[in-house]
């Protein structure tokens, strides 16, 4: 069955451009022309990936992204003309997995869609990870902290799995980018910091497992209170 992709943009020409290229890849495309419609379509159609413009009527793409993240870890790509560093970090802080600036290469967009969908489905093995109070059911793509389930984006899930699989190892931001973003990622290493901040917040008191190594990166280590 073809993956369903929601394209939300108030510019019809952008929707058509993205639709044309992704349809050629065999994806089923659904569209929305404003933020409210995007949320309505999301809850009704349950897409496998969402592409959001930032500047949309009724609700902005960032507002839509935040609401989706309250209940779903579906891959989200922000597609926008707002291309400053602060804009990009705002997108990641809202829960986006990718941020692509307009004008964009449709081929690059397709490559990133393919990669995100591939990554979101590659954990299709019977396996679990446990680290202190954190439990991950990889096959079901579920994470629980001290018995309570939490919702993570695709990148947050991959980042947590990567940390747990490399417990006690000092990891540079560049190494994390290379391993969690599995294609040529031309982003800033501060992207890692933004995702770590969000992940720590969702892990609550157990966010302390992710330790900062100043001037280098991070190390995941479980230290239970006695």
Image (spheres, rainbow, N blue to C red):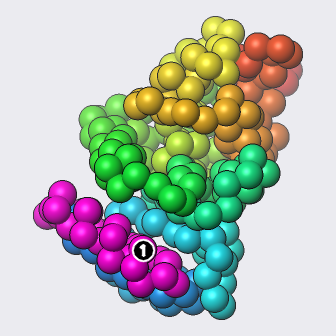
Q: Quadrant of residue 225?
A: top right
The front one of 88 and 117 is: 88
* Residue that appears at 76% across and 13% down: 216
Q: Quadrant of the N terminus?
A: bottom left
Residue 2, relative to residue 215: is it above or below?
A: below
Residue 76 percent coordinates (x, y): 50, 59
- Horizontal side of 48 relative to 93 (left or right) equals left
User: Is residue 219 at all visible to an observer of this figure?
Assistant: yes
The front one of 126 and 197 is: 197
Residue 90 percent coordinates (x, y): 74, 56
Residue 211 percent coordinates (x, y): 79, 22
Total numbered badges shown on the rendered structure: 1
Residue 118, relative to residue 55: is it above or below?
A: above
Q: Is residue 4 magenta?
A: yes
Q: Residues within 10 Å of mark 1 (few under 14, many from 20)?
A: some
Residue 47 percent coordinates (x, y): 36, 70
* Residue that appears at 73% across and 19% down: 217
Residue 162, relative to residue 23: is it above or below?
A: above
Q: Is residue 24 magenta?
A: yes
* Residue that appears at 33% across and 45% down: 111
Q: Quadrant of residue 19?
A: bottom left
Q: Which residue is mark 1?
A: 14
Q: Quadrant of residue 175?
A: top right
Q: Quadrant of the C terminus?
A: top right
* Residue that appears at 58% across and 64% down: 80
- Horizontal side of 203 relative to 38 (left or right) equals right
Residue span colored magenta? 1-26
User: Is residue 149 at all visible to an observer of this figure?
Assistant: no
């Amino acid at each position: 069955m073809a993956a369903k992709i929601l394209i939300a943009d108030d510019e019809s020409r952008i929707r058509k451009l993205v639709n044309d290229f992704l349809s050629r890849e065999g994806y089923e495309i659904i569209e929305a022309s404003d933020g409210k419609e995007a949320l309505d379509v999301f809850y009704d159609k349950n897409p496998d990936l969402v592409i959001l413009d930032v500047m949309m009527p009724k609700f902005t793409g960032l507002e839509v992204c935040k609401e989706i993240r309250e209940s779903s870890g579906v891959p989200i790509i922000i597609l926008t003309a707002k291309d400053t560093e602060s804009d990009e970090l705002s997108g990641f802080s809202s829960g986006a997995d990718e941020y692509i600036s307009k004008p964009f290469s449709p081929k690059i967009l397709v490559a990133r869609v393919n990669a995100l969908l591939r990554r979101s489905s590659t954990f299709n093995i019977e396996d679990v990870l446990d680290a202190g109070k954190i439990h991950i059911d990889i096959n079901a793509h579920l994470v629980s902290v001290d018995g309570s389930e939490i919702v993570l984006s695709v990148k947050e899930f991959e980042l947590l799995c990567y940390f747990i699989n490399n417990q006690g190892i000092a990891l540079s931001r560049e190494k994390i980018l290379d391993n969690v973003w599995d294609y040529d990622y031309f982003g800033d290493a501060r992207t890692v910091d933004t995702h770590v901040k969000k992940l720590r917040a969702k892990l609550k008191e157990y966010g302390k497992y992710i330790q900062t190594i100043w001037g280098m990166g991070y190390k995941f280590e479980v230290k239970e209170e006695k």
